[in-house]
Image (cartoon, rainbow, N blue to C red):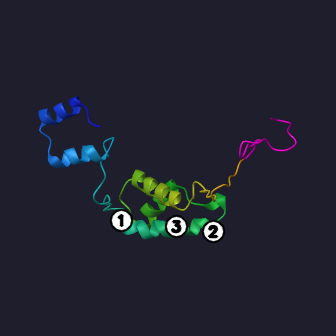
Amino acid sequence: MFVVQVYAAVRQFVLSRETITKMGRFSLPPGYTRSKPVEKPKLGPLLPVIAAILDADRIAPVKQRHTAKRTFERLRDEHGYAGGYTVVKDHVRICRAQGQETFVPLAHPPGHAQVDFGEAVATIGGGSPPGLGLT
């Protein structure tokens, strides 16, 4: 529900109908979203090379896997990459995060639950469970 101050602000700033519609749809401003992904003119042609390096690292022993710095050095030395290290580091971080699941969703049918510890006594239908001596 809008208050009088909000209506006064709308009239004072002469907002467009689209802005007023957005204000009605969202309780907080939705923020900025990009309409298209960021272009990477220097790194773009080498993305398949980075993907191949990271795929090979999945089966390699942990100590022999490429760091982002080593991946950057290989791109620079073997493929003539002229871009910066930070762009490579950010792309490698994103690629590695996509392959990892961060949580396991739990789904239980109605009436069932899962707990780690604890004890519970339930009173169903107004009576106490037998053997507890409660009235």
Crowd class of label 1 (few under 14; some 14 to 19; many from 20; radius 10 Å): few
Location of residue 116 in the rendering, given as x and y in whole percent from the top left corner = 73, 46
- Read off the residue under disc 3: 53
- In the image, taking residue 123 as reference, residue 100 lies left or right, namely left
The image quadrant that residue 2 belongs to is top left
Residue at position x 75%, y 44% in the image: 117
114 vs 52, nearest the viewer: 114
Location of residue 91 in the rendering, given as x and y in whole percent from the top left corner = 44, 57
Quadrant location of the C terminus?
top right
Residue at position x 39%, y 54% in the image: 87
- In the image, taking residue 45 as reference, residue 67 lies left or right, namely right
- Three-letter residue code for mark 2: Ile
The single residue placed furthest to the right in the displayed view is: 131
Crowd class of label 2 (few under 14; some 14 to 19; many from 20; radius 10 Å): few
- Three-letter residue code for mark 3: Ile
Q: Secondary structure at mark 1?
A: helix
| Residues in magenta, as a range | 116-135
The alpha-carbon separation of the residues under discs 1 and 3 comes to 15 Å
Callouts 1 and 3 close, C-beta under 8 Å? no
- Three-letter residue code for mark 1: Gly
The alpha-carbon separation of the residues under discs 2 and 1 comes to 25 Å
The single residue placed furthest to the top in the displayed view is: 5
The alpha-carbon separation of the residues under discs 3 and 2 comes to 11 Å
Location of residue 93 in the rendering, given as x and y in whole percent from the top left corner = 49, 55
> Any mark on residue 59, and which?
2
- In the image, taking residue 110 as reference, residue 120 lies left or right, namely right
Q: Earlier in the sequence, mark 3 or mark 2?
A: 3
Residue at position x 25%, y 43% in the image: 23
- Read off the residue under disc 1: 44
Decide whether residue 95 is among the magenta residues.
Answer: no
Residue at position x 18%, y 32% in the image: 9
Q: Is residue 34 above or below residue 13?
A: below
